[in-house]
Image (tube, rainbow, N blue to C red):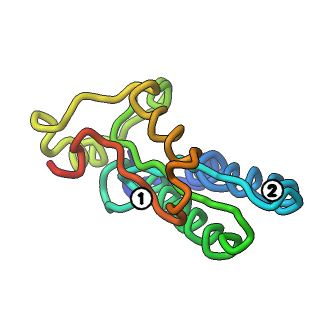
């Protein structure tokens, strides 16, 4: 949750590797098989931080903007060949992401505004149906978007 002035190269590289380089490499590796069979579906993990500037720290926010761009670019570049690429933008989800995190005081102060009014954290089970929907035929006409599944986090 560090602001840009407190983000060192090690933190930047770690978050970039997990949130953007990993999905890029998976996409690149899966594309040949999808193209060979005439299509496929990618569902990326975006975040409400993909649309906002200050919810989760500089590195996280920048990489989540990047995964939204990757999602839209893949949809634009391969949609005419039967490949759909969408994302899910959850709000806060209970994961181990913050387990070993050192939170900057300045970063925390910026990000805790409105804590009392925001919805509770989701679980993986709360978000999974959205992924199933996006991977299903029911979403056949959805491509290049990021579906917000945040229980109203972006409404507060």
Q: Circle 2 sits in a helix, a strand or a loop, which is it?
A: helix
The residue tagged 2 is 34
- Residue appearing at x 20%, y 34% in the figure: 119
> For this rendering, which residue is in front, 138 or 103?
138
Q: Position of residue 38 (x, y in %)?
A: 81, 61
Q: Quadrant of residue 116?
A: top left
**60 left or right, relative to 41:** left
Q: Quadrant of residue 21?
A: bottom right
Pick out the residue farthest to the front. Answer: 138
Q: Quadrant of residue 3?
A: bottom left
Q: Is residue 83 above or below residue 11?
A: below
* Mark 2 surroundings: few (<14), some (14-19) or many (≥20) residues within 10 A: some
**20 left or right, relative to 119:** right
Q: CA distance from mark 2 to mark 1?
A: 26 Å
Q: Position of residue 77 (x, y in %)?
A: 68, 75
- Residue appearing at x 57%, y 49% in the figure: 137
- Residue appearing at x 74%, y 70% in the figure: 81
Q: Is residue 121 above or below residue 106?
A: above
Q: Are marks 2 and 1 in contact (CB under 8 Å)?
A: no
Q: Circle 1 sits in a helix, a strand or a loop, which is it?
A: helix
Q: Position of residue 135 (x, y in %)?
A: 58, 45
The residue tagged 1 is 50
> For this rendering, which residue is in front, 37 or 109?
37
Which of discs 2 and 1 lies nearer the camera? The answer is 2
* Mark 1 surroundings: few (<14), some (14-19) or many (≥20) residues within 10 A: many
């Amino acid at each position: 949750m560090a602001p840009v002035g407190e983000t060192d190269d090690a933190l930047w590289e770690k978050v970039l590797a997990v949130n953007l380089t990993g999905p890029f490499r998976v996409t690149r590796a899966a594309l040949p098989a999808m193209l060979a069979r005439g299509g496929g579906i990618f569902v990326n993990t975006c975040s409400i931080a993909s649309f906002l500037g200050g919810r989760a720290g500089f590195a996280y926010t920048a990489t989540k903007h990047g995964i939204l761009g990757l999602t839209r670019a893949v949809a634009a570049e391969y949609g005419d060949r039967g490949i759909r690429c969408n994302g899910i933008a959850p709000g806060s989800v209970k994961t181990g992401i913050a387990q070993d995190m050192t939170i900057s005081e300045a970063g925390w102060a910026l990000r805790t505004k409105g804590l009392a009014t925001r919805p509770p954290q989701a679980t993986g089970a709360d978000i999974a149906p959205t992924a199933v929907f996006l991977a299903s035929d029911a979403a056949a006409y959805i491509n290049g978007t990021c579906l917000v599944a945040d229980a109203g986090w972006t409404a507060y």
